[in-house]
């Protein structure tokens, strides 16, 4: 459905952030993109959704195909209308708008006649948003804001939803709830999902396939089962040593040093 | 006492017009961070276009007003597309210099077409007076106030319930997030300029009727948007309304109660402007991010 072939992204005409990145997202799947802070995960999503331009970033090489069509020259509005929706890192709800107005903004590209039906669908996945429908979004809790951000995406009827660190800053219980809903949306709506996470353990539990990136490149990919068995992944991303117990802080630090040296 | 009430009522009516003009300024600032120094000239354009339609082309005055307001909206959109769009990404100070330049240019164009001598214009609004609480008040002031309020109500409905209105507020909150849902930020800017031009034109037309003529004075009244928005907060619509009313009252009382030879009616708003800049630079209702400009 989506393929990135040897993508290069440069910010401000000088900073090379993605250095020949390739990945595939098959239709109907949940694909995870993992990597540590600064690896270029958000940049990858923005390259796909056309949101690099306002940050002075540019795809300078390679191509991005969505359902066979090149999209790396299109602007964000066109890409949303083609069926790709990015839920940005940090939730980014419109704080002065009510919950329902946020959802209306999400439905900007959709025919008006569809609105109430879509609203009902979002409230079905997120009953808590219905309770707070007339509240100003800035006053919602972090978890509710994340639900609103995902609900806003649903309003646009996307074929592909890209989620940038939906677990960021949320309590574990809430994260589990939100991930369960993401799996349900994938199953019930058939929506393809590209999931960016720093929390590898969590993402590997939901994904059908996962990529690991470092420093602007994909360094490893495979099924979650394969990756969980991979010694490096266990060490660097899951924080487990050979016996499967959690590593001590000192050991993690040691590995971080080694990792930096290796890359 | 009658004198006080009279000054208060005429101050409120003027204030409603100032608020209308300031509202357009705030919309442009909120949606695109542009400080529009040409807002006063938009008043002038609205008034002169109406003058042209009614006096020069002989249109029936309600038709003339509608055509003039529509043309003013077109001018607003053209300014956004031709002058401001190419400046996206330029430093704020360059954009400010350009809108200052734009204001001189527009004034020069108006001067070239209609000259600089004041011209008498039709007073569409009734010119008789009524007595309210013992004070004589011009009916035209009451009309001006009522029309301004009606326009505010219309815009409030637009921002609450229409797709483009909600999109405008979304862009004001978080431009990149708005882009991520397919909202066309360019369309939002065009709509903001159209609304700013319309509210300014309506303000200019109301003043023209109250003054019974058109001249550069109408554009000078437009300068009052600065004390209004500095007082209310550059990015606050309620601030524009309350700021407009306060400045209207202040101007009316300073001009009417203090010795006329002090001439304080004209300058009082600007004294307030300086004071506010010293003690509360983000205005009564603004968010504290003014340093950015
Ligand atoms: N707007 C920008 N301008 C310049 N450099 C940027 C910009 N955004 C991100 N970067 C740089 O690109 C690299 C990758 O960032 P990002 O894609 O946000 O990583 P991740 O999401 O994996 O944490 C970082 O080194 C970051 O400093
Ligand atoms: Mg990121």
Image (cartoon, coloured by chain):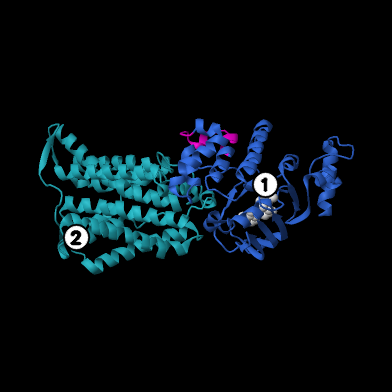
Chain colours: A blue, B cyan
Q: Which residue position is annotated with label 1?
A: A195
For the image, the number of numbered tags is: 2
- State the quadrant of the N terminus of chain A: bottom right
Q: Is residue A88 left or right of residue A257?
A: left
Cα distance between the residues tagged 1 and 2: 61 Å
Query: Where residue B73 sits: x, y (%)?
Result: 32, 58
A165 drawn magenta = no
Query: Where residue B127 sits: x, y (%)?
Result: 11, 47
Q: Is residue A218 left or right of residue B220?
A: right
- Between A54 and A81, the residue placed more toward the observer is A81
- Between B19 and A17, the residue placed more toward the observer is A17
Kindly indicate the quadrant of the structure image that contains residue A75. bottom right
Q: State whether label 2 is within 8 Å of ligand 1.
A: no
SS at badge 1: strand
Kindly indicate the quadrant of the structure image that contains residue A249. top right
Numbered range of the magenta stretch: A133-145
């Amino acid at each position: 459905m989506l393929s990135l072939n040897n993508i290069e992204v440069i910010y401000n005409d000088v900073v090379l952030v993605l250095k020949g990145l390739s990945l595939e997202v098959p239709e109907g799947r949940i694909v995870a993109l993992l990597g540590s802070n600064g690896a270029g995960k958000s940049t990858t999503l923005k390259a796909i959704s056309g949101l690099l331009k306002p940050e002075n970033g540019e795809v300078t090489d390679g191509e991005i195909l969505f359902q066979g069509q090149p999209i790396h020259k299109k602007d964000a509005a066109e890409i949303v209308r083609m069926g790709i929706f990015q839920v940005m890192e940090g939730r980014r709800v419109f704080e002065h708008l009510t919950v329902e107005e946020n959802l209306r903004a999400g439905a900007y590209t959709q025919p008006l006649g569809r609105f109430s039906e879509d609203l009902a669908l979002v409230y079905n996945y997120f009953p808590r948003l219905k309770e707070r429908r007339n509240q100003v979004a800035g006053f919602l809790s972090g978890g509710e804001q994340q639900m609103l951000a995902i609900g806003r995406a649903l309003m646009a009827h996307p074929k592909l939803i890209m989620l940038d660190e939906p677990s960021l800053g949320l309590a574990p219980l809430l994260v589990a709830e939100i991930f369960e809903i993401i799996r349900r949306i994938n199953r019930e709506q058939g929506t393809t999902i590209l999931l960016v996470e720093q929390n590898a353990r969590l993402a590997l539990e939901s994904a059908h396939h996962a990529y690991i990136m470092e420093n602007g490149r994909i360094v490893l990919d495979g099924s979650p089962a394969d990756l969980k068995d991979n010694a490096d992944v266990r060490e660097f991303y899951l924080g487990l040593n050979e016996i499967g117990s959690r590593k001590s802080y000192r050991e993690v630090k040691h590995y971080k040093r080694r990792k930096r040296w290796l890359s | 006492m009658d004198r006080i009430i009279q000054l208060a009522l005429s101050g409120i009516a003027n204030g409603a017009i100032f608020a209308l003009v300031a509202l357009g300024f705030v919309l442009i600032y909120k949606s695109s961070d542009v400080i529009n120094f040409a807002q006063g000239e938009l008043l002038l354009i609205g008034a002169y276009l109406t003058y042209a339609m009614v006096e020069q082309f002989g249109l029936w005055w309600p038709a003339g007003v509608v055509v003039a307001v529509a043309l003013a909206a077109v001018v607003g959109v053209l300014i956004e597309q031709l002058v401001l769009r190419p400046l996206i990404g330029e430093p704020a100070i360059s954009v400010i210099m350009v809108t200052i330049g734009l204001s001189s240019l527009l004034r020069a164009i108006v001067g070239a077409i209609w000259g600089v001598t004041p011209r008498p214009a039709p007073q569409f609004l009734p010119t008789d007076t009524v007595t309210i609480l013992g004070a004589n008040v011009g009916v035209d002031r009451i009309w001006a106030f009522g029309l301004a309020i009606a326009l505010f109500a219309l815009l409030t409905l637009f921002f609450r319930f229409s797709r483009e209105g909600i999109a405008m507020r979304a862009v004001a909150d978080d431009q990149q997030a708005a882009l991520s849902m397919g909202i066309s930020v360019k369309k939002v800017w065009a709509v903001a300029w159209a609304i700013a031009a319309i509210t300014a034109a309506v303000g200019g037309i109301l003043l023209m009727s109250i003054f019974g003529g058109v001249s550069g004075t109408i554009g000078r009244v437009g300068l009052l948007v600065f004390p209004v928005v500095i007082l209310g907060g550059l990015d606050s619509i309620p601030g524009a309304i309350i700021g407009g009313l306060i400045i209207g009252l202040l101007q009316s009382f300073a001009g009417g109660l203090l010795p006329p030879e002090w001439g304080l009616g004209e300058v009082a708003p600007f004294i307030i402007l300086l004071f506010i800049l010293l003690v509360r630079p983000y205005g009564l209702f603004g968010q504290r991010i003014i340093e950015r400009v």
